[in-house]
Amino acid sequence: MSQKPQHQLSACPGCAEPLDSGDRFCGACGYDLTAVPAPQPGSDRPTVAIGTPVDWPEAPPRDPYALSTSTQHPGDLPVMDSGGHDLPPRTPAHGTPGQEAPAVGEAGPAPARDLPTIPVRTDGPHAAATSGDGLAALAEAGPVPSPPPAPPSSPPPSTEGDFTLAAPDPRAAASQPVAPQPVAGPKVCVACRAGRVDADGYCENCGHAQPRERDHMEQELSTVAAVSDRGLRHHRNEDAFAVSATALPDGSPATLAIVCDGVSSATRPDEASAAAADAAGRSLLAALPRGTHPQQAMHEAIVAAAEAVNALAEQPGQDAMEHDPHRHQNAPACTIVGAIVADGLLIVGWIGDSRAYWVPDDRTAPPARLTEDDSWAAQMVAAGLMSEAEAYADERAHAITGWLGADAYELAPHTAAFKPDRSGVVVVCTDGLWNYAEAAEDMARVVPPDSAGRLLHGAQVLVGHALDGGGHDNVTVALLPFTAGPRGAGSA
């Protein structure tokens, strides 16, 4: 009697119970794992053309007891993905030629009423799409050394309540002169321009609440820029970012960008995103100058971000406790996505549904999405239980299945490395942007052609695009230019 092929799932699609590769049925719910089609090799990674891998120094051995047992390491897992399994098969949302979403009948799924339950967090409306592949996977990364726990950041305190003044429009920033503020002394109300702002953030003359510092943030360096905006519907900005530049041991530059999106259904999501972005950024700035491979450094940074968010669960929010000490407090949570450009490599890492895109300077070349969402719909399609059209039509489609937080099912960072063969720009963003430019082709159309030379302007235009579309969510985007070497350099 022939054996059925082994599955390649890390958890049961029915109840999320951890699985071994030889299991034919789930030990918890009895789910028939032989009905789940195996993913097709080589079709699951957005890629860029590859040259010879960079000869990075040998990674130091890691302490197996330094991280929690739920943390997984690239050295323990196959090649590019440090999340414990291959990325789910990519099925085009817009009918990419030559690819079709698996039909429900082909995978033998249960009837709709018996669809499996997957641990999810719902964070408002989301939209998802995939794009055609234009890239090629890089070589395997070495084992990951364990990072020291990064202390959580101290984000500005959040204040609940309605907000009467809109955040500044980034599209108008360049044309509006900024009134100089005195170095010391009281702030002047942005509404009446006469009253002083008290310590609680209200005008003593007209009573208007003043915009919070995080309602609109911009930062620009020579090699990276980021813009974050509250949007038009939310009362506060629950996104955060960290951008920076450093140098590798040989003196070559390295640029990094981290973008985090607080989960609105969680407690203190603004603090979670700020803590994660700060911890991940500081972890990368410590690891890259030591010679740590960028892909390893990205994994370490996500682990450090997770530990920072976990620490918030042990520190109840002061504002919430003062207003209602009996109110249920769940764990702070956020998503994370990051990118590193260093020595001809492009590294991305993520957990959740924040994304990274590749947009070449030559717009005749295909763009690509570099990340795969951790979402209910993506998992249903990957498991062959639903077609893509059916999965994304479901009301649960955009509930996230991966996040940073003390109540996360497991910590499974995804990382991938690429070596583009041409110059372009990397777009790192929250769903507040990509909801208005879902597919890679859509994103490429809204990225200004001169973004590589005008990074802050490009980020402002993208945020403006989301606001023009309705601004239903917080919007955060970072742009990193990638400059390819001469043709033939570093190629096999």
Image (cartoon, helix red, strand yellow):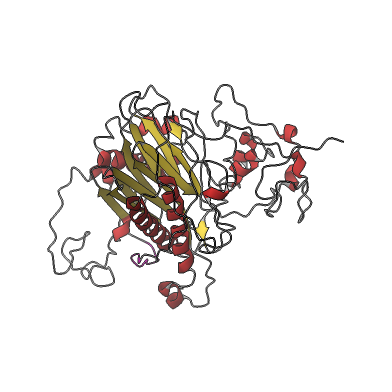
- 429 w.r.t. 156: above or below: above
* Image spot of residue 400 (x, y percent): 55, 50
Q: Dividing the image into 4 quarters, which one contains the N terminus?
A: top right
Residue at the (35%, 60%) spot, across then down: 163
Which residue appears at 71% of the width and 42% of the height? Answer: 7
- Residue 40 on image: x %, y %: 63, 32
- On screen, residue 463 versus residue 193, left or right, reads right
How many numbered dots are placed on residues in this image? 0
Main secondary-structure element of the magenta-colored stretch: loop
- The C terminus, quarter of image: top left
Span shown in magenta: 154-162
Q: Position of residue 484 (x, y in %)?
A: 32, 30
Viewer-nearest residue: 234 or 362: 362
Q: Quadrant of residue 158?
A: bottom left
Horizontal arrangement in the rendering, residue 457 relative to residue 50 (left or right) = left
Residue 166 within the segment the image draws in magenta: no
Residue located at (59% from left, 58% from top): 409
Q: Quadrant of residue 183?
A: bottom left
| Residue at 67% over, 31% down | 102
The answer, for residue 292, to whether it is visible in the render is yes
Q: Is residue 170 above or below residue 184?
A: above
Position of 279 with respect to 350 (left or right) is left
